[in-house]
Image (cartoon, rainbow, N blue to C red):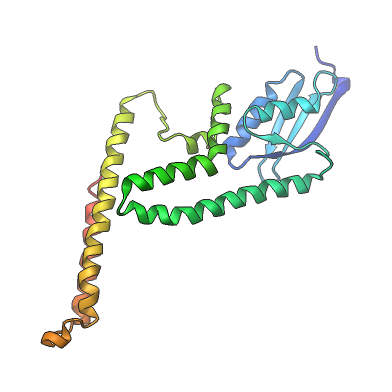
Amino acid sequence: MLSKENIETASLPVLGVTFAACGVSVESMIKSIFGVHNAEVNYATQTVKVVFDSIAVQLNKFKEVLQSIGYDLILDTEKGKEVLEVQKIHYKALKSRIIATSILTIPIVILGMFLTDMSCVLATLVLFIFGKSFFINAYKQAKHGEANSDTIDAAKITLVSFDLQQVYKTLCLSRQTVKTIRQNLFWPFIYNLIGIPIAAGILYPINGFLLNPIIAGAAMTLSSVSVVSNSIRLK
């Protein structure tokens, strides 16, 4: 039986809450701790408000539980650093990973047009090096029977029903999508390879031919229509 005399309320900064689903996970895990009366996450301020029995449970227990599912809780001070400084370090590290991933994505996209296998290898390396936190947190969530945005990011396929046939249908749709993307890249590439030199007047010294801008515009429109028409075939 918990005593009402020892009830305390604490508002603590929490790291890793990026979506509403993350807040739900944090609340459910803290509420499952013996001695906790209520827990509410404020997504805007990145804090969790906990009403608990100070005799039955200590603040360090909240931190331990949240770390087990991929989040972290900042107490009043941590290793001599102020709360704002700890948050700043966390967001700076996240920003660095995003910038590095964005830079490395450019050569992967270019290679994907010609060397698909090599681009897949590089994409996998970038994914596991800079996105390893998503997989680690997803695993931690799965151990507790929970799921959040990290689970969606880490999972290649997310089922919202118990119909396993949806996996096969998704794989088929994925293959069709990749095939369509390659077709949509190939034909515009050929069009530009032929059309741009002609529009620039490469044939003029030979036979005096100049491409009428109206015809060039119509050809470009036709190219766009073909890409859209090819894409809407996906079902």
- Left or right of 16, for residue 109: left
* Residue 51 to residue 86: above or below: above
Q: Tell me the residue at 45%/34% (across/down).
A: 155
- Left or right of 114, for residue 29: right
Quadrant in the rendering for residue 113? bottom left
Residue 154 placement (x, y as % from top left): 48, 36
- Left or right of 73, for residue 235: left
Q: Tell me the residue at 44%/41% (across/down).
A: 124
Q: Tell me the residue at 72%/46% (across/down).
A: 87
Q: Of residues 40 and 78, which is closer to you in this image?
A: 78
Specify the quadrant that holds the C terminus: top left
> Which residue ends up furthest to the top in the rendered image?
1
Residue 172 placement (x, y as % from top left): 27, 36
Q: Of residues 231 and 133, which is closer to you in this image?
A: 133
Q: Tell me the residue at 49%/39% (across/down).
A: 153
* Residue 67 to residue 181: above or below: above
Residue 53 placement (x, y as % from top left): 82, 22
